[in-house]
Image (tube, rainbow, N blue to C red):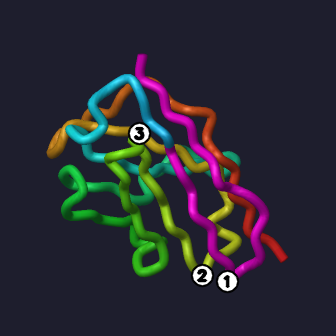
Amino acid sequence: QVQFVESGGGLVQPGGSLRLSCAASGFTFSNYAMSWFRQAPGKERELVAREISRGGTTNYADAVKGRFTISRDNANNTVYLHMNNLKPEDTAVYYCNARRPYSTYYFNSWGQGTQVTVSS
């Protein structure tokens, strides 16, 4: 079955950096475009970063543009989210998911997420 295991979160000061990892299994990773989402307390899950196609064009939410970068390692079925210049408003649980390139449909399965807390 499809599984996502996110890791790499933690407590970081404003202006700091983190690299999140998501290990995916249960589907042919190289055939799918990957995305990162986040959910802050009391808010809906939102799309943060995504690949339009497999490892090609990417786009980002305005709130993170220029600070976050999505990348992938097909050999290890892993997607990363590099986060720089973190702000308190980036505090959330971060999740990854996958979809067919150019599709709008993601898997119904979600991982446990990884908590990112930005605070001094």
The quarter of the picture where residue 70 lies is bottom left
Cα separation, mark 2 vs mark 3, equals 24 Å
Can the viewer see residue 72 in this picture?
yes
Coordinates of residue 5 in the picture (x, y in percent):
56, 36
- Label 3, label 1: how far apart the Cα atoms are: 27 Å
Q: Secondary structure at mark 2?
A: loop
Question: Circle 1 sits on which residue?
Answer: 15
Label 3: how many residues lie within 10 Å, few (<14), some (14-19) or many (20+)? many
**Residue 20 magenta:** yes
Left-right relation of 30 to 34: left
Q: Which residue is mark 2?
A: 85
Question: What residue did someone put label 3 on?
Answer: 97
Amino acid type of the residue that numbered disc 1 sits on in the rendered structure: Gly
Q: Amino acid at mark 3?
A: Asn
Q: Is residue 110 above or below residue 43?
A: above
CB under 8 Å between discs 2 and 1? yes
Assign a secondary structure to mark 3: strand
Q: Quadrant of residue 89?
A: bottom right
